[in-house]
Amino acid sequence: MSNTGALNIAAAGADAAAQDLAGPRGARPKRALSGRNIMIYGTLAVVSLYYLLPLYVMMVTSLKGMPEIRMGNIFAPPMEITFEPWVKAWATACTGLNCEGLSRGFWNSVRITVPSVFLSIAIASINGYALANWRFKGANLFFTILIVGAFIPYQVMLYPLVIILREMGLYGSLTGLVLVHSVFGMPILTLLFRNYFTSVPEELFKAARVDGAGFWGIYFKIMLPMSLPIFVVAMIIQITGIWNDFLFGVVYTKPDLYPMTVQLNNIVNSVQGVKEYNVNMAATIITGLVPLIVYFASGKLFVRGIAAGAVKG
Amino acid sequence: MAATRRPPTLFRNLNAKIAAIPMILTALVVFVGGTAWTVVYSFTNSRLLPREKFVGLDQYERLWSSNKWLISIENLFIYGICSLVLSLVIGFVLAALLDQKIRFENTFRTILLYPFALSFIVTGLVWQWILNPQFGIQAVVRSLGFESFSFDPLYNPDIVIYGILIAGLWQSTGLIMCLMLAGLRGIDEDIWKAARIDGIPMWKTYLFIVIPMMRPVFITTLVIIASGIVRVYDLVVAQTSGGPGISSEVPAKYVYDAMFLSQNLGQGFAGSTMMLLAVIIVIVPWAYLEFGGRKRHV
């Protein structure tokens, strides 16, 4: 798509016509140290440093002891590396009277994220498939409502969902929260799957129909195996989104079921006791670790995921 | 013709309809039903539990005479306008820099986008620490000899919202940059060649040719940023909990506090209805431009 030096081709074209045919062809190589390059790379390097700074500060602070933090400079590397803050953040940090550390929040988040990711993707992929290949009357109306609904502030629907969950006996349980995540993940995921399945060649679908495959047969035998990349994209969107959620966690669960983000906030912003900044930063990193690993491991797919979230169908 | 009659319409394509049940329930019950419910109950005097005693616009009058709400709205405006303008400008400039066919593009993009993978809670807590006046940037600059240097946005009610803005921009400009980069990559190479042959300087090409061509990308990005701004909640909770005092409150937090902390459901419903109204004001013109405008071309 992008030719190297395509910008110069037009300019070089005029020169090339005048040159001997045996001479070198193509664009003239650019000097590496032109003023323009220095400006571009310089700006990007400075901006990158600024973006990396918080990660660096978090890391450095979490490896220092409290005396060193009180004396020194937050940007200075630790003189004496200690992993104690990490251990404390994980196992013994307190929220109010409870001193089990972040580990409880971590496992709650796992128990929330894993079923939510599976359920929301299962619902949305089948739904997107029905919308793309088995259109029925009224389908587009519901789909439009779903997409428009994605823009409604969550606060508008918070309390009605409390009532619905209470009626179902699920308010305050992890199952309830999993349902909430599946509901609010539906617009973007359905859009993602619908657009993907629409782009699958129709001949394939028709051939399967002729061979006698039905709704579920085509989904499981053709669509599912063909669209693994889009499932990975959906998983990236959901894992990071649900892991990072705070609002639903705090509204729809009880204190002992709070996800990691809520517990982290309670640990760091608790007013009791002496502030242990190193433990706080260790806890913050540990909470950010899961989405960061997903991000760095997924590379371009993550970008594709957010582009899918942003580009309308 | 065979004698078999076609099945009644309800059962035609039955599997697809079964598969769409979750979507239909979500759309009708949660999105339409929930929204309508909240709007209707914003006209009642519900407190601890929803009640059907209608009191007209009382809740709205109380809302707009509440100091906390007025500060929330003011903060949302400052945060919203700054964050819209800055993230569009910064996002576009970074995308344009990355689009210069440079080396290490992937590395730069990875670095600029990683904060977006982090939650607002993590973002808020990190910046709370960096902006801590006792140990953070202020202390470091002072220790370099600038004794009177003062930079403590999180403890100064007048500028606390800008402290939150710094963290918000750090988290989200990477996303805007990616969207802009996708838009820039969608511009035909021939446009650049033509501009170069005509001797138009690069900044003019960007300003007068490329940006107008990217109008749809800008509008979509604008809508994404705007609908995100209205929701700002976790960032404020983590970074300042609305403080000092109530100087960094935002509407989403006002609504949560009213509903779940101060047992004042009616105020929560009225506040969230106002948030809905704000979103409608942003979305409707956009939807009109996007979908109303397209029909004319077809």
Image (tube, rainbow, N blue to C red):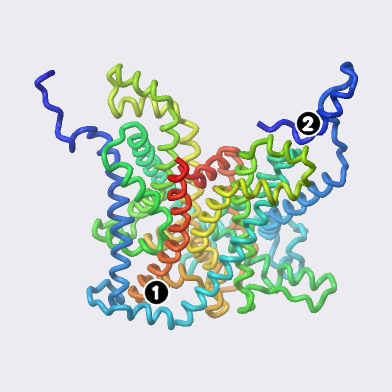
Query: For this rendering, which residue is in front, B293 or B237?
Result: B293
The mark found on residue B258 in the picture is 1
What secondary structure is found at the residue carrying circle 1?
Answer: helix
What secondary structure is found at the residue carrying circle 2?
Answer: helix
Where residue A101 appears, as percent x and y from the top left, is: 52, 59
Where residue A193 appears, as percent x and y from the top left, is: 42, 37
Residue type pointed to by label 2:
Ile
Question: Mark 2–mark 1 contact, CB under 8 Å?
Answer: no
Quadrant hosting residue B275: bottom left
Residue hosting label 2? A9
Query: For this rendering, which residue is in front, B43 or A250?
Result: B43
Looking at the image, residue A213 sits to the left or right of residue A148; the answer is left
Where residue B283 appears, as percent x and y from the top left, is: 45, 58
Vertical arrangement, residue A275 with respect to residue A137, above or below: below
Residue at left offset 33%, top offset 56%: B31
Crowd class of label 2 (few under 14; some 14 to 19; many from 20; radius 10 Å) = some
Instruction: Judge whether residue A272 can be spotted in this image.
Output: no
Residue type pointed to by label 1:
Ala
Quadrant hosting residue B62: bottom left
